[in-house]
Image (cartoon, rainbow, N blue to C red):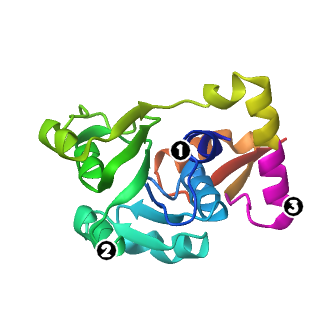
């Protein structure tokens, strides 16, 4: 529902749109890839290294950019034939947020829904003037705080799951007694999808 609220309810992504998804191997990132693709948009997944590229393509990313190995802005411009992406859906913030603005199309939208980076998140003033983007804070309250939005979201996601267009991706399952090990696994940032605890 987190990805649905920003990409479908608010941005109304559609065929022809490009969506940049930082932290793409996280559970919300993987959901955003699937939701963008299901809506007809082209998901561009960002990951730090090439290690997860193959799995991100298998999860539905049309393009994957390893940000520590490639120039993200140049790659987005190459993929979009120089026009830039219409939407960026960012849980990271920090110094790379300015690059997301640079990779947007004119009047694109940058959603920020987390602060995984501990660094300040600068606003690139000249790029903002040139591109005129909308920068939006986002939370799932947009969906959960309104009964009708919530009903439509549940229906959308349920239909997507039934059709196979949306598929939960489980990284690893732990027993409740192994909670400490589950937290260690999470803190290593190596997961691909959800970590599940079984009772």
Number of residues whose C-alpha sits closer than 10 Å to that of mark 2, classed few (under 14), some (14–19) or many (20 or more): few
Q: Earlier in the sequence, mark 2 or mark 1?
A: 1
Q: Of marks 3 and 2, which one's residue comes earlier in the chain?
A: 2
Between the C-alphas of marks 3 and 2, the distance is 35 Å
Q: Disc 1 or 3, which lies upstream in sequence?
A: 1
88 and 179: which is toward the camera: 88
**Residue at 46% of width from left, 50% of height from top?**
188
What stretch of residues is rendered in magenta?
155-170
Q: Is residue 149 left or right of residue 3?
A: right
Q: Position of residue 51 (x, y in %)?
A: 42, 72
Residue in the foreground of this view, choosing between 57 and 173: 57
Residue 11 disc label: 1
Distance in Å between CA atoms under marks 2 and 1: 21 Å
Give the mark toward the camera: 1 or 3: 1
Residue visible at 57% across and 60% down in the picture: 33
Near mark 1 (Cα within 10 A), the count class, few <14, some 14-19 or many ≥20, is some
Q: Which residue is mark 3?
A: 162
Relative to 56, residue 149 above or below? above
Distance Cα–Cα, label 1 vs label 3: 24 Å
State the residue at coordinates (76%, 32%). 150
Indicate the position of residue 82 as horizontal and vertical percent values: 27, 69
Coordinates of residue 159 in the picture (x, y in percent): 84, 55
Locate residue 48, reporting x and y percent: 35, 61
Towards the viewer: 31 or 117: 31
Asked if 85 appears above or below 65 in the picture, the reply is above
Dot label at residue 81: 2
């Amino acid at each position: 529902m987190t990805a649905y609220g920003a990409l479908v309810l608010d941005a109304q992504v559609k065929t022809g749109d490009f969506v940049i998804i930082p932290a793409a191997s996280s559970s919300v990132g993987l959901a955003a890839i699937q939701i963008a693709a299901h809506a007809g948009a082209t998901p561009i997944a960002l990951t730090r290294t090439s290690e997860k590229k193959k799995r991100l393509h298998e999860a539905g990313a049309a393009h994957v950019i390893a940000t520590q190995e490639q120039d993200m802005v140049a790659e987005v411009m190459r993929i979009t034939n120089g026009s830039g992406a219409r939407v960026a859906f960012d849980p990271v913030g920090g110094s790379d947020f300015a690059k997301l603005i640079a990779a947007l199309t004119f009047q694109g939208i940058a959603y920020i829904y987390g602060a995984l980076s501990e660094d300040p998140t600068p606003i690139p003033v000249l790029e903002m003037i040139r591109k005129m983007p909308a920068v939006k804070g986002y939370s799932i309250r947009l969906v959960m705080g309104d009964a009708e939005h919530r009903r439509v979201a549940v229906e959308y996601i349920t239909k997507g799951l039934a059709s196979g267009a949306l598929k939960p991706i489980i990284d690893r399952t732990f027993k409740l007694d192994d909670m400490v090990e589950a937290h260690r696994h999470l803190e290593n940032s190596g997961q691909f999808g959800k970590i599940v605890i079984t009772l």
